[in-house]
Amino acid sequence: MKVVTTRDELRAARAELSVRADTTGADTTGEVGVVMTMGALHAGHEALLRRARADVDAVVLTIFVNPLQFGPAEDFDRYPRTMEADLALARACGVDLVFAPTREVMYPGGDPVVRVDPGPGADVFEGASRPGFFHGVLTVVNKLFALTRPDAAYFGEKDYQQLSMIRAMVRDFDLPIDVRGVPTVREPDGLALSSRNRYLSPVEREQALVLHRALAACAATGSVDAGMAEYAKVPEVKVDYLAWGEGRWLTAAWVGGTRLIDNTEASNS
Ligand code: AMP
């Protein structure tokens, strides 16, 4: 596994991947796949990497805590950074190439002047609560697409609105990339894995289960009221939104100082 941090190193390593992808056996696709992360890797990221490993000939992992997508009052400075453990997990998943740029490598000359306009899809849910979030996400994803030149890209359904905004960008910009969604990985008790779960105290970790319970209640009844009734049982948790959109039940809530999101498919069965 090669680990690179500069654009020159990435260019050289990416070119090598193409040569290898072109000369492999008939049972491989010759595709290069990318998994983009902010590090602090867990079993959710691992599922993306393993899916990519199974699908494509060469797997690229990017690790970059993107300052553009954090608001001024958000957790950019204290976001967990666990590079050594991340690289160990990447190695165990058979990643070929890791690109872990610094802020200066990603944004030479300062923050980008031109940014992706996410359109009206960013006016609701995460976009409404976090102004500028999707501008930042789509801008860095677009840059990382240009830098890593993947055939396929893997994103988690955990961030469902993000997945659909990335699909929209790929469609509207005619990017030659196959976007593949991967189902949310959960703890046995239902909590969706998140790098931010490590902020939770043991008591908050218990309280955080209400997101999953609220979504399950919505999915079972088809009504937002049933989900809000679940939230009402845990008054320490402050709901940001619980709503229907994108064909899913979507929620965000504050558990102490930690903002968590989750979503689930509809099912009335
Ligand atoms: P992040 O590092 O949190 O920006 O996430 C990087 C990628 O991993 C995104 O595509 C996320 O949707 C995905 N991801 C994060 N948590 C999970 C999870 N619990 N299950 C599946 N994918 C996830």
Image (tube, rainbow, N blue to C red):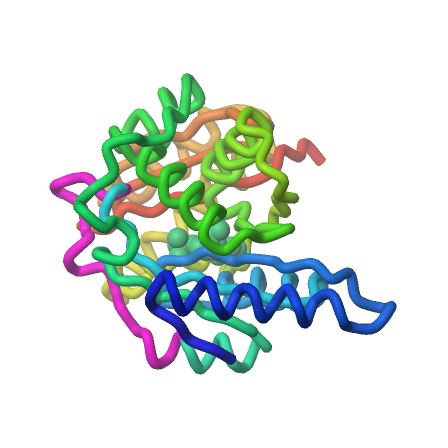
Start and end of the magenta stretch?
69-86
Q: Which residue is drawn at 19% across and 53% down?
A: 76
- Looking at the magenta stretch, what is its main secondary structure? loop
| Relative side of 97 to 199, left or right | right
- Judge by depth and name the residue closer to the eye, 195 or 168: 168
Q: Position of residue 208 (x, y in %)?
A: 35, 52
Q: Which residue is drawn at 65% across and 44% down?
A: 178
**Is-magenta flag for residue 85?**
yes
Seen in the picture, residue 154 relative to 69 is either above or below; the reply is below
- Judge by depth and name the residue closer to the eye, 254 or 26: 26
Q: Residue at x 43, y 50 (%)?
A: 144
- Judge by depth and name the residue closer to the eye, 205 or 172: 172
| Relative side of 139 to 91, left or right | left
- Residue that extends furthest to the left in the rendered view of this protein: 73
- Judge by depth and name the residue closer to the eye, 170 or 187: 170
Seen in the picture, residue 208 relative to 21 is either above or below; the reply is above
Which quadrant of the view contains residue 48?
A: bottom right
| Relative side of 233 to 185, left or right | left
Say which quadrant the C terminus sits in. Answer: top right
Q: Position of residue 135 (x, y in %)?
A: 33, 32
Q: Residue at x 65, y 62 (%)?
A: 51
Q: Is residue 256 visible?
A: no
- Residue that extends furthest to the right in the rendered view of this protein: 26
